[in-house]
Image: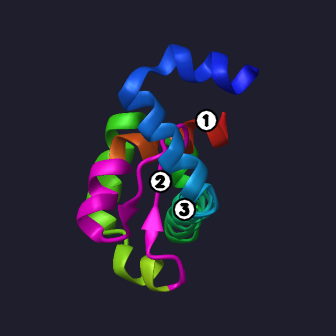
Amino acid sequence: MIDAFIRSILGDWGNALLDFYIANSLWINGIILLYALLVILAQRNYKRITSSALIFLNEKYGSQLQKKGKGSLVQMMKKAGIPWNEIIKRSWNPFLTPPGSIRLYLSNEKTIDKLLPLEKIAELIQKKEG
């Protein structure tokens, strides 16, 4: 009864799509779950990369980080040159995803520059210290 009601609402294309989904639901749901797992692992990788950068800066500059403003922190980080390639190599996961996003990005220096600019790291340092 419910099936007939739903199919009457869907129309021709909707019925074809529903039949395709019913026939292949295991594969479709498996792909969706795999993608969700990859997104969760990529978000953890993003957090790990962020914390590794903060640890690197804390080891290199220590107490100087507390005394600096956002602009001077950015200049200091440009001068320090965060070793992104070393940080990326420590992770086994080739993807990263910023919090609140579901898009997967490849872990490389260009992507990190885009997703984690120095200004964002300076904000994180100020939040951590404050």
Q: Looking at the picture, does residue 3 appear above or below residue 67?
A: above
Binning the other alpha carbons within 10 Å of mark 2 as few (below 14), some (14 to 19) or many (20 upward) gives: many
Binning the other alpha carbons within 10 Å of mark 3 as few (below 14), some (14 to 19) or many (20 upward) gives: few
Q: Which mark is residue 97?
A: 2
Question: Is 30 displayed left or right of 93 in the figure?
Answer: right
Residue flagged by tag 2: what amino acid is it? Thr
Q: In front: mark 3 or mark 1? A: 3
The local secondary structure at tag 2 comes to loop
* Residue 39 at least partly seen: no
Question: Is 125 displayed left or right of 79 in the figure?
Answer: right
Residue furthest to the right in view is 1
Give the residue displayed 44% in from the left and 29% down from the top: 14
Q: Which quadrant of the structure image shows residue 26?
A: bottom right
Residue flagged by tag 3: what amino acid is it? Ile
Q: For this rendering, which residue is in front, 99 or 23? A: 23
* Cα distance between the residues tagged 1 and 2: 21 Å
Task: Please give the range of residues in magenta.
Answer: 90-117
Query: Pointer 3 and pointer 1: residues touching (CB < 8 Å)?
Result: no
Look at the magenta stretch and give its main secondary structure: loop
* Cα distance between the residues tagged 3 and 1: 38 Å
Give the residue displayed 65% in from the left and 41% down from the top: 129
Residue 106: image location, x then y, percent = 35, 67
Query: Pointer 1 and pointer 2: residues touching (CB < 8 Å)?
Result: no
Quarter placement of the C terminus: top right
Q: For this rendering, which residue is in front, 2 or 105? A: 2
Residue 15: image location, x then y, percent = 47, 32
